[in-house]
Image (cartoon, grey):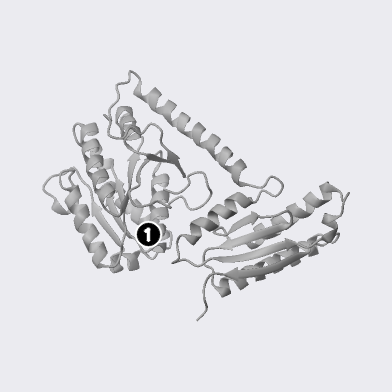
Amino acid sequence: MRNLYAPGDLAQFEPGDHISLIYDNDQDQKNWSITCARKALNQHEKMLYLIDPSQMEGTMSALWDAGLGLEALLQAGQLQIRCLSSVQGQDDKLVHPDNIQQILHDELEIAREQGFETLQIMAEMSWAVECSPVSEVVEHYETAIFQFITQNPAVVMCQYDRHKFQPDTLLGLLTSHPYLALGETVYENFYYLHGQPRHLAADYPEVVFDTWLRNLRDYHTSQEKMWHSSTHDVETGLFNRAFFDEEMAQLEKDPSHSIGMVMVLLDHPELLLEGFDPQVAREYLRRAAQVLKTASRQSDVIARVDERQFAVLTRDGDFQSMEDTVRRIRSALKSHNQDIHRAPLNLFLWGATSRMEQ
């Protein structure tokens, strides 16, 4: 699992991740379905939907409206949909906890034959409320899936409608998942009890459940603030040198992806003069940072790496991408200086890429 406190794509899950989505409304469920489908499409993974029949029409409509090329995904086999149901005797609409592992093994083998290395599983669990006892069925099902993903290249998100499941069942989910998704955020779940009993006796399970969710949110907020203060430059709000070096080290570990970098020097020699107003210097830095933010894409990493020097790091680092980045910065700089006639900003740019041109 990626750094939960860093901004970016919320669906950057890794094989072996076990996530529980507890949603308050159908829109949250649809949003995550779209997010994960887009991830599968972009990273060439196979998406398997195990979905309750009652959710089928709404989810399919949401995927279609998102412009993901649903028909093409289905024809290419990158998207597979199987209905979940508690109704016996309907083989095409039944994924029972007792045979879910075999079904997932079969789907993974098919995915490998199709050239997909990772199986991403989305399981909508509303069907389970018709079973008895609900908590035991859910635990049986979750355990079977968890055993599968720990031994195979797969990631799973099980989706639960908060209004359909009893609080004691939801408490069991909190103790059985290392990661919890609420709204648009994924939380590191410190209530996860690996290998421990998953049902907790509570006189007021709804109160306990609400308290645990509040604690998770508060902890996440505090950690996010701590992460931000340790990785960002105070004067510009950009990433700092420590974060930049760490990001470079991570990218260098994966030689399959090239790295592009544009270095930017705030070219105002007067900033080095002794006695130069520090407030003016900070204003120059903030203006330069704003130009870089305007010119950069969401996937780019922008950092202040020295007193007057910045870096824009791109993950698709061919020469064309690097030149496009320089062009965007120059265009943003020109617009900035036109808007602010006094003291125009001077930036000196140069770039490099790790990709060798043929």
Query: x, y percentage for residue 96?
Result: 17, 45
Report whether residue 172 is seen: yes
Say above or below: 221 vs 208.
below
Query: Residue at image x 42%, y 59%?
Result: 65
Say above or below: 338 vs 188.
below
Query: Is 303 left, or right, of 265 in this rendering?
Result: left
Nearest the viewer among 191 and 203 is 191
Quarter of the view holding residue 179: top left
Identify the amino acid type marked 1: Ala
Query: Is 276 left, or right, of 12 in this rendering?
Result: right
Query: Is 231 left, or right, of 128 in this rendering?
Result: right
Query: Residue at image x 51%, y 52%?
Result: 8
Nearest the viewer among 305 and 194 is 305
Say above or below: 324 vs 285.
below
Helix, strand, or loop for circle 1? helix
Query: Residue at image x 83%, y 50%?
Result: 280
Quarter of the view holding residue 284: bottom right
Query: x, y percentage for residue 14?
Result: 38, 52
Query: x, y percentage for residue 160?
Result: 33, 40
Query: x, y percentage for residue 348?
Result: 74, 67
Say above or below: 318 vs 170.
below
Report whether residue 239 is seen: no
Query: Residue at image x 30%, y 68%?
Result: 76
